[in-house]
Every structure is written in structure tokens, then in C-alpha cells.
Amino acid sequence: MAPTALFIILLLVHISNSNTCDATNPAPKFPAVLVFGDSTVDTGNNNYLKTLFKGNHYPYGKDFPGQIPTGRFSNGKLVPDFLVSILNIKQTVPPFLDPSLSDNDLITGVCFVSGGSGYDDITAAGAGILAFSKQIELFKEYVVRVERILGDKEAKKLITSSLVVVSAGTNDFGFNFYDIPTRRLEFNISGYQDFLLNKLQIFIEELYELGCRKLAIAGLPPVGCLPIQVTVKFGKPKDGRCVDDENSDSQIYNQKLVKLLSKMQSLLPGSRIVYLDVYEPLIDMINNPHKFGFVVTKRGCCGNGFVEAGPLCNALTPVCADDSEYLFWDSIHPTEATYQYLSKYLEKNVLPKFAYRNQSRPSITLSGHPHRADDRY
Ligand SMILES: *[C@@H]1O[C@H](CO)[C@@H](O)[C@H](O)[C@H]1NC(C)=O
Ligand SMILES: *[C@@H]1O[C@H](CO)[C@@H](O)[C@H](O)[C@H]1NC(C)=O
């Protein structure tokens, strides 16, 4: 190879490396976003299941484009929707169970999530929803469909470079430990945290086996500030108090999660596994509502805001006048306004962690002429 040709190749490698790392817009490029988790990220799979836990009726979706109740458990869009929009992929993430998905819908990313789900399979048991073990089965079906569309080689590339988002855990603690103490007969809180993190570890390994490499794993929100948790604990609204014990449990779980993710990234070659912090931005909104234009942060907009969610938040339930002033939409789920702030936080603090110099390409320097390439642009 002529020296000039080699030089140009090295220069191109150098420029493309710089573009992925140092560009003014830090958002890295992903061809697709794939989502696993619970109702905070369910864009409508529960519509296709025999379950009572659905958000496909008014007033859910009242601020969604076209005022459509899509099954999203909020008044509008969710974080995955804002995320694909930030990444310039599309406007919303469709549910995988939607029978009308186009090839393009599939190869730009879908959601395998089911509202009410958790890492512990007993969380979903008997509720007619998709446990995590079922979500991974759907993902396997997805891989087969994408292979049919793109061919094996391109499908593999797509999965490897897609952003995978996993968000769950709240239901496990709520359903099995705090509110209905099924698992409390077996575990203390620390033991149950470890049990769930072990399930998550196995889930991440399965995703890795199936080709996923870029993962963002959400921690817990301040669970003790969910209006439903305050109601269960105190029996009635407790003038703005959160359940402190549950919040400190959430923080301890999150610290353990951070450790686990960094361990897993070093165990799984070529992976990038990033912690997605939802606790800090949410507690900031709860403690400093005016900074975000919120007025009400301790109860939901739907009904009296302390118990209503799913079937209890329905067309007969009165809603607040202005949901953009509310942090919570119902007694469990944030409003679209909150999800939008969370998405901005994610854009600023989480996505840049995927744009790593050290990622897929080796860093090549022109030995002997370290400055020449830089001088050219
Ligand atoms: C929780 O249970 C484990 C054993 O199952 C025990 O080692 C640990 O000390 C317990 N922690 C607390 C805080 O009780
Ligand atoms: C590059 O990535 C590998 C694997 O993720 C990691 O072990 C290594 O420490 C990283 N190197 C630098 C300089 O960040």
C-alpha cells in the first residue's frame, strides 16, 4: 500500500473516532432502542394481554398526540419515546405485541415491557402480564424477525449497536415486600435486594448472550415518595411526608446496583453497561418543585391522587386542571412533564457515557507524526 493511502486511511479512522467522542452534541448514534421493564416504560403491550392492569382508557393518554389512550401509564409520552426522539430515530417506541408493526418499526426498536412486571417472577404471577422471563422470550422472537428482514449478519450488527434500556424493581419491592409481604417471610430487605440483583444479573447475561452490548439499567426511584406507598404506610396522606425507610432502601439498592453493573461490564467483553439514575433527578423535583414548574408533588393528578392507578383511574375519575403542575399522574406513575425532565437528565448524564473513545475501534495514533493529522482540520 502506498504511504499516502495508508495515511488517508489513518486520517479517516482518526476523524471518525473524534466524531464519536468529541463532537459538540455528545449523543452517540444508535440504530434502535430496545426496552425491557415495568409500567414506567410500557408503551402498550398490556393492551394485548388478559390483565386488568391497563392504561388504554381515558384519562390515560389525554396529552398524547391525538389524545389517544395507547396503554402508556401516563397522560402522554414516556422516557423511551423522548429517548428515540432525542436520538433522532423516531417519535415513539411501539409495543412488540402490536400485530401491525412494519419492518421499519422493528428495526428501529420496540418495547418488550409489561406494566406490573418485575425482576422477581412472582411479581407478575397470576396478573396476566409478562414476567421478565417472558420478555426475553419475546426478544428471541424479535431477533428471528429482524434476521428475516435484514439477514443474519446485519441483524447481528443491529442488535450489537442498539441501545437496550431496562427499568424495573419498584413493583418487586411494592408488591412482594412492603405492601404484601410475600417475600418478607423469606428475606430481610438486604437479602431481597441481593435476590433481585441476582435475577437482574442473569437477565443481563441473557441479553449479552443474545448479542446486546450497550445497556442502560435504571435504578430505583425514591419508592417511599410514590403516593401509593405513602397511602399504604400511613393509611392517609401525611402532609407531604415520604416513607423515609423505603427511600433509604432504594438508595442502598442503587449503590449495590452501581457496583454490580461495573463488575458485569468488566466480566462481559465489549459491553458498555451504564447505570441510569432516576433517584437523584426525581428527589430533586420532589425537594425543589418550583425549579421545574411543579406545584403538587405528593399526589397524582388522577382522582384524589393517593390510590388511583390502572382500572381505578378511569373515565369517571375527575382529573386535575393542569397536569403539567403535577409530578405524578396517578398514585404510581409520573406525568409526561416529569418524564420529559427525566429524559433531559438522561441525555445530559447518561447517554454521553456511551460515547467512549475506548469503544469499538482501536485508538490509532500516527507514530512518529502525532500532530500531522490534527494539522489537517
Ligand atoms: C439479613 O439476613 C441475612 C441472612 O439471610 C443476615 O446475614 C443479615 O445480617 C440480615 N440483615 C439484617 C439487617 O438483619
Ligand atoms: C477500555 O475498555 C476495556 C473494556 O471495557 C476496559 O477494561 C479498559 O479499562 C478501558 N480502557 C480505558 C483506557 O478506558
Image (cartoon, rainbow, N blue to C red):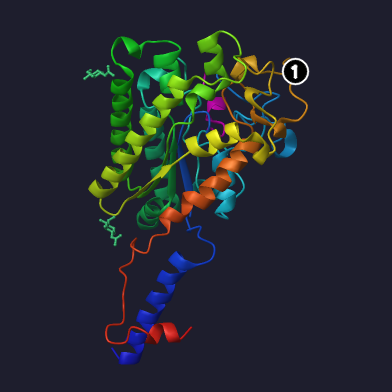
Image quarter hosting the N terminus: bottom left
Q: Residue at x 65, y 40 (%)?
A: 291
Question: Considering the numbered disc 1 on the image, is that residue within a helix, a strand or a loop?
Answer: loop
Where's residue 160, x and y in %? Answer: 37, 53
Looking at the image, which residue is at 71% across and 30% down?
A: 323
Q: Kindly indicate the quadrant of the structure image that contains residue 201.
A: top left
Reply yes or no: does residue 47 show up in magenta.
yes
Q: Neighbour class for label 1 at 10 Å: few (<14), some, many (≥20)?
A: few
Q: For disc 1, does the CB lie below 8 Å from ligand 1?
A: no
Residue at 54% x, 46% y is 345
The quadrant of the picture showing ligand 1 is: top left
Q: Is residue 295 above or below residue 240?
A: below
Q: Nearer the viewer, residue 36 or 259?
A: 259
Q: Is residue 297 above or below residue 366?
A: above
* Residues rendered magenta in the picture: 42-52
Name the residue carrying label 1: 318
Tally the numbered discs: 1
Which SS type dominates the magenta stretch? loop
Q: Position of residue 53 (x, y in %)?
A: 55, 19
Give above or below for 180 relative to 341.
above
